Amino acid sequence: MRFFARRAAFYLFTAWAAITINFFLPRMMKGDPVSAYLLKNQGKISPEAIDSIKTLFGLDDGKSMLQQYIDYWGLLFNGDLGRSFSKGLAPVTEVIAAALPWTVGLVGIATIISFFLGTLIGTIIGWRRGSKADAIVPISTFFSTVPYFWLGLIAIAVFSTNLGWFPASHAYGKGTTPGFTWEFISQVIHHGTLPALTIVVSSLGGWILGMRNMMMTVLDEDYVTVAQAKGLHPKKVMLNYASRNAVLPQLSSFALSLGFIVGGTLVMELVFSYPGVGKLLLDATNAKDYPLMQGVFLIITLTVLVANILADVAYGILDPRTRQMES
């Protein structure tokens, strides 16, 4: 219990620090959201409405930075992340909620597939070290070193332009009405297959190499030797003894990957014009939409923290030595 209590205290402090930085950093930048909004809508807003806009963004004249900070925490506890002036003053929560499912659905599924497939292949290659299966490692590593921008463009050129198997951009076809219909779902799957495959191909090498190296380390441990000496089936030794311990470092990396899913693969969303959180963050940055930038950064930060908490819990359950070291 002491292990989990210490980790909880650490993550609470980290969350407070991240939220505090998220509050002060945009206010340290040149300009402010009100000025940017007035410049964008020059001549369209009456002087009487300026005070209301300042109140809307929490930048009232005469209000100290400390009071703004306290008000910011109050808004967070109420689930209010402010309003996006680049999206017609729509609530930031609604803007992010509209983009979030696309990123989580595409990048999340691709990351999970890549993790399980890479871990399985790495387990088999590590168990059969020195065999012809080792040839998979340099091939998969090569694709991991290719810049994603080029990999995405090559995939579009081959599978979209030349072969015509998949669409080159967007999440669904023009004129398609979003809804829980087979037509819309099939469009989403068809449009998402190519970017998902490029994510899997580009990230597979890391999972394979990491699991293969850990397997080769674990195979020299005494408990694996004892299990083999008992005459246990090789498959049982590989899965129940070797891979179970070798996968522990992979879980930490997987948790971090899940946390960064919300941030999306920005380059992927740009190459394929995919309407995810990564592209939303870029659009907010270009428009100097500070409330939307704050909201996206906050969601990404909290998601990474939650993913790390889950990784710590899983690590503590699977490896009791971790708890003993901090007790």
Image (spheres, rainbow, N blue to C red):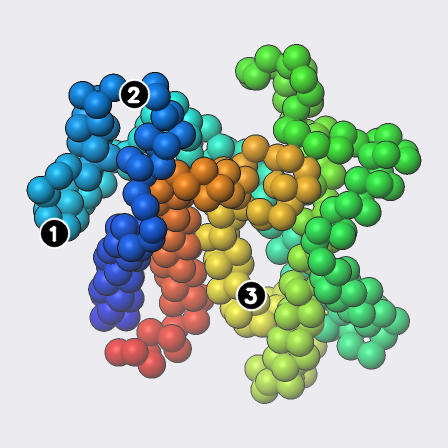
- Which residue ends up furthest to the right in the rendered image? 162
Q: Counting residues from the N terminus, which is met first, the one under dot 3 or under dot 2?
A: 2
Q: Which type of secondary structure does the marked residue at label 2 adopt?
A: loop
Image position, residue 46 (x, y; %) = 25, 19
Q: Is residue 294 above or below residue 188?
A: below
Residue for point 13% across, 39% down: 61
Count of labels in the image: 3
Q: Is residue 150 above or below residue 5?
A: above
- Which residue is disc 3 drawn over? 250
Q: Residues within 10 Å of mark 2 (few under 14, many from 20)?
A: few
User: Which corner quadrant of the image does residue 15 belong to?
Assistant: bottom left
- Which residue is disc 1 drawn over? 66
Cβ–Cβ under 8 Å for marks 1 and 3: no
Q: Amino acid at mark 1?
A: Leu
Q: Counting residues from the N terminus, which is met first, the one under dot 1 or under dot 3?
A: 1
Residue for point 26% across, 66% down: 10
The reply to whether residue 117 is in sight is: no
Query: In this rendering, which labeled residue sits more in front, label 1 or label 2?
Result: 2
The image quadrant where one finds the C terminus is bottom left
